Amino acid sequence: MIFLLSLSAALLFGVGDFSGGFASRRQPVGAVLFTSQLFGLLLVSLVSPLLLEGVPRAADLLWGAAAGIGGAVGILFLYHALAHTVVAIVSPTAALVGALLPLVFGLLIGDAVSPIGWIGIGLILPAVVLLSYEHLEAGTTVEERRRAFLYGIGAGAGFGLFFILIAQTSPAAGLWPLAGARITSLAMVACYSILRGRSLIVRGQGIGATIMAGTFDMAANIAFMLAVQSGRIILVTAVTSVYPAPTVLLARLINGEKVHPLRWAGLAAAAAGVACMGIG
C-alpha cells in the first residue's frame, strides 16, 4: 500500500508539473503558481473534514506550516532561477538535492533499506538527474553557471525540507497539515508577487490547465503524506522523486516533443529503480 501511494504521488506530481508548465506558456508563472495553489487549498479543505473527526493538534499544524515555508522557498528559488539563470543546471541540481535530503534524513533516523532497495536508490538518483536534462546553451559564463547551481541547491533544499517536515505530522492529524502548508506557501508567493508587481490570478486562456495543476499537485501531496506517515521516508521519497518521468512522457505524447537519449536512459533507470524499491 505504501509503495502504491508513493508511485501514485510520483505520477500525480508529474501530471501536475506538466499542467503547470502548459499553463505557464499562456499566463505569467507567478499567477499560475498562486491560482493553482489556491485550487489545491480548496481541494484539501473539502477532503480534510471527511478524514478527521475533531480538531488536529497544534503541533501538526505547525509542522505543516513549516513544510509550507520550505515548499514556497523551493518554488520561488526554482522559478526565479528558471527565468534568470541556466535551466540546464538548475533543473537537475534542484531535482537531485530535493531527492537526496530526505534520503539522508531517513538514514539518520534509522530507516532500514534492503540490499535491493539500495540498488533501487542507486538507479533512481542518476535517473532524476537524467530526467531533468536540458541542453546547455553555448556562451554561458562561469558566473552564470555558479549562480544556477546555487539557486538549484536552494530550490532542492526547499523541496527536500517540505518532504521531511510534512513527514513529522501524525496520522491522527489527517490532511489538515497540508492545508496549513498551503496557506503558508500561498501567503509567501502572494507577498513575493505583489512586491514584484506581478499578477496573482489567471484569467481566460490557461485557466483549465492551471486548475488541473493545482488539483493534481495537491492530490500528489495527499498521496505522499498518507504514505510517508508510515515512517518509511526513504522508500516514499525515493519512489516519489521519479515524478519527472510522467512529465517527460506527457510532453512526448501530447506536445510531440522529442525526448533526448539521456532522458530515455533516465526513464529506463527510473523504471528499474522503482521496481527494485517495490520488491525491496
Image (cartoon, rainbow, N blue to C red):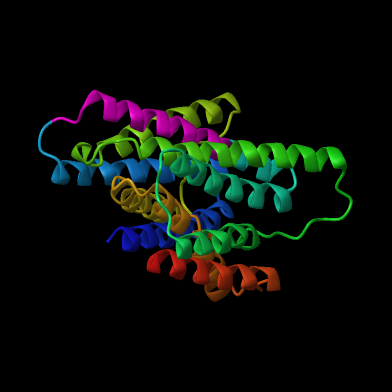
Residue 61 among those drawn in magenta: yes
Location of residue 160 with respect to 114 vertically, above or below:
above
Where residue 274 appears, x then y in whole percent? Answer: 46, 66
Q: Quadrant of the C terminus?
A: bottom left
Q: Main secondary structure of the magenta part?
A: helix
Question: Does residue 201 appear anywhere in the picture?
Answer: no
The image position of residue 72, as x and y in percent, is 49, 35
Residue at x-position 53% and y-position 75%: 253
* Residue drawn where x is 42% and y is 62% of the image: 11
Q: Is residue 18 left or right of residue 173?
A: right
- Check if residue 94 falls in the magenta segment: no
User: Which of the 4 image quarters holds residue 178?
Assistant: top left
Residue drawn 40% across the image and 50% down it: 112
203 or 139, which lies in front? 139
Q: Say whether residue 92 is visible.
A: yes
The residue at the point 46 percent across, 38 percent down is: 108
| Residue 101, position as x, y percentages in the image | 53, 42
Q: Quadrant of the N terminus?
A: bottom left
Task: Judge by depth and name the residue closer to the eye, 166 or 206.
Answer: 166
Q: Nearer the viewer, residue 110 or 135?
A: 110
**View extreme (front): residue:** 115
- Magenta residues, start to end: 55-76
